[in-house]
Amino acid sequence: MSVDIGLGVDGISVRDQFLTPAQVRALTDCAHLRRERGDFHTARIGGHQNLQRREDIRGDSTCWIVPPLLPAEQTLCEELERLRLELNAQAWLGLFELEMHYARYPPGAGYARHVDQPQGHGQRQVSLVLYLNEGWTPAAGGELRIFDADGGHRDIEPMAGRLVCFLTPGREHAVRSTQRDRLSISGWFRARD
Ligand code: OGA
Ligand code: MN
């Protein structure tokens, strides 16, 4: 794995094969194991006192990747730590720590247009999404849609091994309705409070 991943002029980067097929499978197994343990919960929106379940806005279930980490998760953390240092060196972003969770969208689910800085998460500076969907086809939908300031957008398919990074502040994006189970890891590099 290489960490040469500039965020480009538009602050978005898409890198294929960030994960090897073996890593994709190992992380998928980790997600299933955590799911069997009952660690996935339906995602809620809003912050702090104001959390609510709104499947029309957000239909995924999530599981925070927190210690004790499984071996494939530990490896991923080490690779993302190298990415963090690389991004700091390239862009002086002052990235300090990483938070991440699995997200599973059942058929019919999506995530309406939003930014990744709900109340209390203002320190999120870079958003990451890693996809674990082997054999994804365009007919399955479920694209990540990233909007730009002049009304356009870009759609990115959630192919296995692909890493998408973008600068978090103000960047609106959505997950289009998926036709099949869609598994990913969402993460954020945060700056110090
Ligand atoms: C998120 C998110 C995008 C994706 O988890 O906040 O926007 O493609 N995910 O899964
Ligand atoms: Mn998001």
Image (spheres, grey):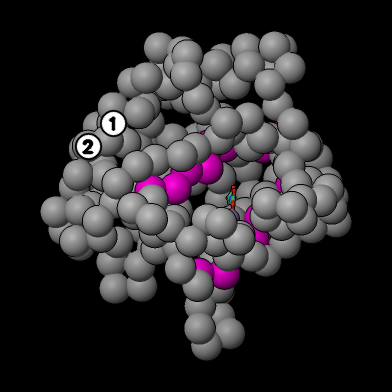
Is disc 1's CB within 8 Å of ligand 1? no
Tag count in the figure?
A: 2
Mark 1 and mark 2 residues within 8 Å of each other at the beta carbon: yes
Question: Marks 1 and 2, how far apart in space?
Answer: 5 Å
| Left or right, residue 130 beside residue 77 | right
Can residue 34 be seen here? The reply is yes
Magenta-colored span: 171-189
Residue that numbered label 1 is attached to: 79
- Can you give x and y, in whole percent of width and height, for residue 29 in the image? 56, 15
Q: Secondary structure at mark 2?
A: helix
Which of the two residues, 178 or 111, is positioned nearer the viewer here? 111
Whether residue 98 is situated above or below residue 94 in the rendered picture: above
Check disc 1 and give the amino acid type. Answer: Glu
Which of the two residues, 125 or 5, is positioned nearer the viewer here? 125
- Can you give x and y, in whole percent of width and height, for residue 30 in the image? 55, 16
Residue that numbered label 2 is attached to: 82
- Can you give x and y, in whole percent of width and height, for residue 130 in the image? 47, 40
Residue drawn where x is 52% and y is 56% of the image: 121
Q: Quadrant of residue 41?
A: top right
Whether residue 47 is situated above or below residue 82 in the rendered picture: below
